[in-house]
Image (cartoon, rainbow, N blue to C red):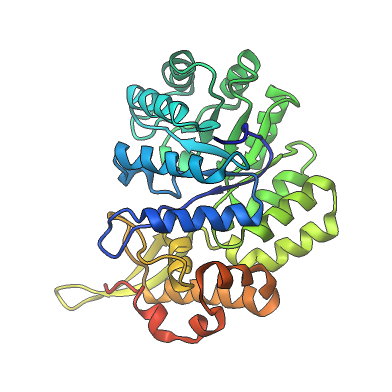
Amino acid sequence: MTAPFRPYGTHTALVTPFDAHGVLDVGGFKRLVEFQRAAGVTGLVPCGTTGESPTLTWEEHDALVRTAVALVDGKLSVLAGTGSNNTAEAIRGTRDARDDGASAALLVDCYYNGPSSLELRTEYYERIIAAVPDLPLVPYVVPGRSGCALAAADLAHLHLEHPTRVPAVKEATGDLARMRQDREFAGDTLAILSGDDDLTLPMMTDPAIRAAGAISVMSNVAPGAVSALVTAAAAGDADRANRLAEELAPLLGLVGCKVFSSCRLPNGREAQVEDRFRNPLPVKTVMAGLGMLEGTCRPPLGRMTAAAVAKAREAVRAVWSRAPQHLTPIEEAFGVSIEARLADDAVWERLVARR
């Protein structure tokens, strides 16, 4: 049993734990859900981008949604990721999520195929709305991942025609001007949820956007602190929201990680390479370093370079140094010492990829 979907507050985009061999770690997933529940987040988002949905089988996907639904015990909502690059598969996943008790479904724009905004609306979202009655659907606009984007006008069309079925959008365009269009076209009734941790506060405080909350990656690590930031921003407590954002900034800026490294080619030449490690690899590296996870990601995601792992470690160290209260709940929940793990080079070296 889950709570009804609440289009506000903090919804954690859950990572999917795997063991060292890439096998789904259901026990680890349960520990993460309990950690989130104890922190008082608004809802959970299993099987999204952060959950590595493209590498999950549908059987694994369904098992994770069912597990989340069972564990929240009516206290939190479960917004299940069910998007696909195949409308029929998205219908199947959304129908199963509904039948498994999810509160709502998160639908990423139909990636790789490159549909127009009109096609996204009519051949994807509207077909899913018609095929799976009663379940609220949240479009997830992330052109950097999908290679396409539901336009603000088509989003407004869906919301205004189906206000209870499409109550919110996850906005991960990184484009504040586009978000202002979302609000202008759809009006006050559309809930805009931040899909970029470092933009959550600007999105909530911009009077032309008025975001209602976040679907957060870094709340996997600091759920209480991210929830407090969102709550403060919603209440208009600018001093507290700004302080929390400043304290969390090293983590919130680590959702993606860019570093340069050198590479020796087979012919002996050295080349400089810019590596861009994308979500969820940085957050899972942090979680593995802190002892919250055993493994990291499934291929094609792998491990980060030494420079990137060092950057992740320093981000944690910066938060721990300035505001340790945001991370101390990890110690009790996972039976670890953050101080000891930050000081242990071997813990972080084992997370490094070799070029």
Where does residue 99 sit, x and y in percent of width and height? 44, 26
**Residue 221 in view:** yes
User: Going by the image, does 27 lie left or right of 137?
Assistant: left
Where does residue 293 sit, x and y in percent of width and height? 42, 65
Where does residue 88 sit, x and y in percent of width and height? 33, 22
Q: Nearer the viewer, residue 25 or 123?
A: 25
Q: Nearer the viewer, residue 163 or 22?
A: 22
Indicate the quadrant where residue 314 lies: bottom right
Q: Nearer the viewer, residue 3 or 83?
A: 3
Which residue shows up at 76% across the image and 26% down it?
188
User: Going by the image, does 86 lie left or right of 134?
Assistant: left
User: Going by the image, does 75 lie left or right of 259?
Assistant: right
* Quadrant assignment for the N terminus: top right
Q: As displayed, is residue 339 above or below residue 130? A: below
Which residue shows up at 38% across the image and 48% down it?
52
Q: As displayed, is residue 224 above or below residue 3? A: below
Where does residue 338 sit, x and y in percent of width and height? 55, 78
Looking at this view, name the residue that lies furthest to the left.
267
Which residue shows up at 59% across the image and 56% down it?
219
Which residue shows up at 56% across the image and 21% down it?
154
**Residue 181 in view:** no
* Quadrant assignment for the C terminus: bottom left
Q: As displayed, is residue 245 above or below residue 167? A: below
Q: Nearer the viewer, residue 175 or 308?
A: 308
Q: As displayed, is residue 353 above or below residue 18? A: below
Number of marks drawn: 0
